[in-house]
Amino acid sequence: MATADHTLFSEPELRALLEREEGQFLEFKSLWELSGDSRRVLDRRQVRDIVAEHVAAFANADGGTLLLGVEDDGTPSGHRYPAEAVADLLAVPERRLRPAVRCRTQRMNLDGSEILIVQVPIAPEAVMVEANGFPYRVGDHVVREPQEVINARKVAYRRVGFEQRIRTEATIEDLDLDLAVRFLSGTVFRGRGAEELLARFGLILPQAGTPAVTNAALLLFGKSPVLRWHPRAGIRFFRVAGRERRHGAERNVTQLARIDPPIASALPEAYRQGRDYVRRSEKLHDLFFREMPEYPEFAWQEAIVNAFAHRDYEDQAREIEVWFFEDRMEVKSPGDLVPPVTLDLLRSRTPVHSSRNPLVVRVLVEAGLMREEGEGILRMFEEMEASYLNAPEFAMEAATLTVTLLNEPIFAGVSAEWQAMVRRLPLSLAQRRVLLAHPDGFTNEDYRRLNGVDRDEAYRQIQGMLTFGIVLPPEAPGRGAAYRVVREVVEQRAEAYARNANAKNAIQTTHTGGSPPWVAERLPGLRAYLVDHRFLKNADYRELFDLERDAALRELRRLVQEGYLHMEGERRAARYLPGPRIAEGTE
């Protein structure tokens, strides 16, 4: 039978767990079926199927926690099953799975609702649901995989799984327990003592006398000198002067830094150093109308944390390397890909999960330094696209995985003259961006992809460009229809507006200290609004001056730069307070 364990979670720990999102190691399942405004308990057979499916999926992957009686948003909703039915549900992992999976279970009442907790271990071999195949956990989804694929992965882990091996010569005294407590302070078990924390994550194993210490514990939290446990478990940064490495008298490589383990301190330090080494990009400056990093922070950090999480620690002759070239950044990680992960799956953004180091992965995920499995790579692509950079590249050579981030914008080839003309046009940032990205013409899909808007909003904004006369309607309607840019009109309009702006600037510059002419028009209304309100948001500014979101954001940024406003917060939380210059000229 499943082992009932009242020490799995305390009430505060369970509440903290419910604040988490479902992912590789966590699943919420409601025990109610909604029908209109009413609800009824799920059929017991259906619940048994749910338990079997998710327990087997966790066991076939890296283990996890199944919470029954919880809605998808983490709200406790409990159940109405009698005691014998609950016992029957908790016995499913041993009765319906082959081989049986021995889970730890707990029942806890939270806000009047009983939650059933099932803690699932990693199974040593593939687990089958009777007559329903072999489920496998990938992120927050369950997929089906062949038995032989799951078993091959488990055999490989047992054969070369460096992290789970016990280091017989190490003791608990070789671990920096203060570092472990600090690093794990964001997990649901943060209130527990250091040794109990490490045991909960499988990093140390209780035994008579002192606990047994795994290599994973030493990699993550080992005391200095950690190199006695692994001589190459850190990371090095290099800068190359140019696009290719040269040797001998023409050597153009400089080592920037070497950071040694433990991982718990090396990873945050690698992030800090990386921020210093990632330069600001003039190429992106012209395209975004503001200075930006060469690479999105999430993208390069995800490449680094994945290297720490998934590298082959059995290879003790090499460490992780980060190379900064003139045109790219490369993160090199020792070790082949672990099946079923392939380069094609990575390149196609297909969610796939396989951990060479599941103990390290789980700690990094729980500590908040790593995205759930299946999410990080996808977001790397999204972040690069959002910065109008080429997609990440993946290559495998000589048992080394290289992740390459290119800093050349996808539409960097546009001429400086065209950029200057486009920037002079009184268009929204989104409209100007599409002219830079597609100077000859574009589709509705191009516009949506570049600016992150839906089809209807893209159509509305494109209609504004049609009215302005700088694009022509498609020759034929339908999917893929292209709007042709009328370059002659763009040039004429840009020159006309530049002349007009120069004339207005000559008249009004004394009133706004060299600010654009529209600033003088906005200030009276802005001052009046701020008399009655402590701050305003983008939506307030749009309503005040009847502007679109992009135009309002552009003006607000300029008002902040000029000192008329002061911004607090970021993105949707941004709000604008009176700046030091707001009262100028009111006396």
Image (cartoon, rainbow, N blue to C red):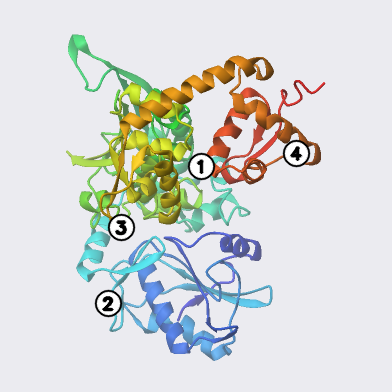
Q: Earlier in the sequence, mark 3 or mark 1?
A: 1
- Residue 271's x, y, as percent? 46, 34
Instruction: Point out the residue furthest to the top here.
Output: 249
Q: Amino acid at mark 1?
A: Glu
Disc 2 packing (10 Å; few <14; some 14–19; many ≥20): some
Residue pictured at 50% horizontal, 48% vertical: 368
Q: Is residue 488 above or below residue 382?
A: above
**Identity, as a three-letter code, of the amino acid under mark 2:** Gly
The quarter of the displayed image where residue 112 is located: bottom right
Neighbourhood count class around disc 3 (C-alpha, 10 Å): few under 14, some 14–19, many 20 upward: some
Disc nearest the viewer among 3 and 4: 4
User: Counting residues from the N terminus, which is met first, the one under dot 3 or under dot 4?
Assistant: 3
- Residue 352, label in figure: 3
Answer yes or no: do the residues labelled 3 and 1 have beta carbons within 8 Å? no
Mark 1 Cα shell of 10 Å, populated few (<14), some (14-19), many (≥20): few
Q: Which mark is residue 133?
A: 2
Residue that mark 1 sits on: 173
| Residue type highlighted by circle 4 | Tyr
327 or 488, nearer to the observer:
488
CA–CA distance between discs 3 and 2? 18 Å
In this rendering, the label closer to the viewer, 4 or 1: 4
Placement of 339 over or under 52, stated as above or below: above
Tell me the SS state at disc 3.
loop
Q: Residue 529 shows which numbered tag?
A: 4
**Nearer-N-terminus badge (3/2):** 2
- Whole-percent x and y of residue 385? 36, 42
- Asked whether the beta carbons under mark 2 and mark 4 sit within 8 Å of each other, the answer is no
Q: Secondary structure at mark 2?
A: loop
Q: N-terminal of the two: label 2 or label 1? A: 2
Name the foreground residue: 563 vs 36. Answer: 563
C-alpha span from label 4 to label 1: 63 Å
